[in-house]
Every structure is written in C-alpha cells, then in structure tokens.
Amino acid sequence: MAKKKRTAKKQTLAATSASEQIDHDQALSALIKKRAGDKIPRDELSALKRVEKAIEDEARWRHYGEMPKRDYLEAAGRQTVQVHKHADRYGVPVRGRSVDLVALIAWLHQFLDDNGEALDAAKDGRQPSPELERLRAEQRKKVEIANRKAMGELRSIDEVYATYNYVADVMRKATEDIRKTYGDGPADLIREAIERGRLALQRMTDSDQANANTNNEGHDDAEQ
C-alpha cells in the first residue's frame, strides 16, 4: 500500500478536531499555571507537551518546504544557471526564490522510477529499450511544454476558445450597429467572417485531438 504523501505545512496554533481543541485548552491552562508558579496537573502537562511537539513538527515541515535558494545552491555545490538548466531539461522543481524539499524528494523518486532502466543500461553499457526511449521522449516533451506555458509562449485550447468567443461577441454586437447604419449586406459579411473563423479554429483543434488519439493508439498497440 502506497504511503500517504506528506506536504510541507504552515505552522498554526489552530485546532482541527475536538481532541486537539481539548489539548489546546489544557495546554493554555498549563501555561497560565506555569507562569504563575502553580502546580500543573499531569493531564495538562501532557497536553502541553503534545501541543509543543505538534507546533515543532509543523515548523520543521514548513522549513522543509521553504529552503532558501542560496542555501540550496550552497548544499548542491552548483551555480544558479546550472540548477536552472536541470530544471528546464529534466523538470527538477528547483526554480523560484526557495526550494520545496518535499516536492524535490517526491520528484527524485518518481524520476528514478521512470528512468531506472535507462540509468542501469547506461551504467552497464547497454542500450535502453525503444519503449523506454519513447517514455523518456514524452517526459522531455512534457517538461518543454510546461516551461513554455510558464513563459507564456503556449496557451491552452480553452484559453484560445475563450478569447475567440470574446472577440466574436464584440464583433456580433458591432455588426448590429453596422446593420442599422449600412443594411444587411455588410453585416452579413462580418457574420460570415466570424463563422469562418470559428470553423477554422474547430478544424485546428479537431486535427490536434485526432493526432493525439492516433499517438495514444500507437502507444497502446506497442504495449500489447
């Protein structure tokens, strides 16, 4: 059974359950007694220790998720340009002002799962299987697409349609004004242009989807 993935958490004093609320109330009572120099009951002292440990754990996980970039570069023994090259080429999650070590560890083990055969083949001087080469090429393509999206070079089909629909709606409203002023002829020409644009966009997206389906079918055939 796969272990539940843990993510870095923000430090918080807020209780999230009835039992935690009781612990927090008892811990607060213990702190008040401690500052007053009064004797602390055993149950309150235990609650205080649990709350302090929970806060300490949360703080530690928060730091795991926010390692300063400067510290990471020092630990890695690499320059920023080298680290970013690895991020762009392999998808290593190390861009940004800080590094999420939890995400980095998860990425590392996934990378080893996906590329272990190729790494072993390279170590032994063997050629990796064609199927593995295909998977690696797909991974590189995914990384490239993600990077181009992040840089604003690519837009999703949904974004393209949303932009087109907005422009088409503006043109349709303008068409009604043109119809009132110049008659049906010019207005109909604009409506036809809008429809031709919609059909061209649909053909483009349908073609892309057909190519994607063909590639997926080829991959399925290769696996059978």
Image (cartoon, grey):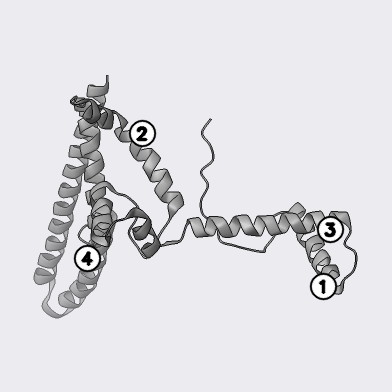
Q: Residue at x 49, y 55 (%)?
A: 64
Residue 214 spot, x, y in % from top left:
19, 33
Cα distance in 3D space between marks 2 and 3: 47 Å
Name the residue beneath numbered marker 3: 44
Residue 20 location, quadrant: bottom right
Q: Nearer the viewer, mark 3 or mark 1?
A: 1
- Identify the element where label 2 is drawn: helix
Nearer to us in this view, 162 or 211: 211
Q: Nearer the viewer, mark 2 or mark 4?
A: 2
Q: Residues within 10 Å of mark 4 (few under 14, many from 20)?
A: some
Name the residue beneath numbered marker 2: 113
**N-terminal of the two: label 1 or label 4?**
1
Nearer to us in this view, 188 or 95: 95
Horizontal side of residue 54 vs 147, given as left or right:
right
Quarter containing the C terminus: top left
Horizontal side of residue 162 vs 2, given as left or right:
left
Residue 28 spot, x, y in % from top left:
79, 66
Is residue 186 at least partly visible in the picture?
yes
Residue 171 spot, x, y in % from top left:
20, 70
Cα distance in 3D space between marks 2 and 1: 53 Å
Name the residue beneath numbered marker 4: 168
Cα distance in 3D space between marks 4 and 3: 67 Å
The amino acid at mark 1 is Arg
Q: Nearer the viewer, mark 2 or mark 1?
A: 1
The amino acid at mark 3 is Glu
The label on residue 35 is 1
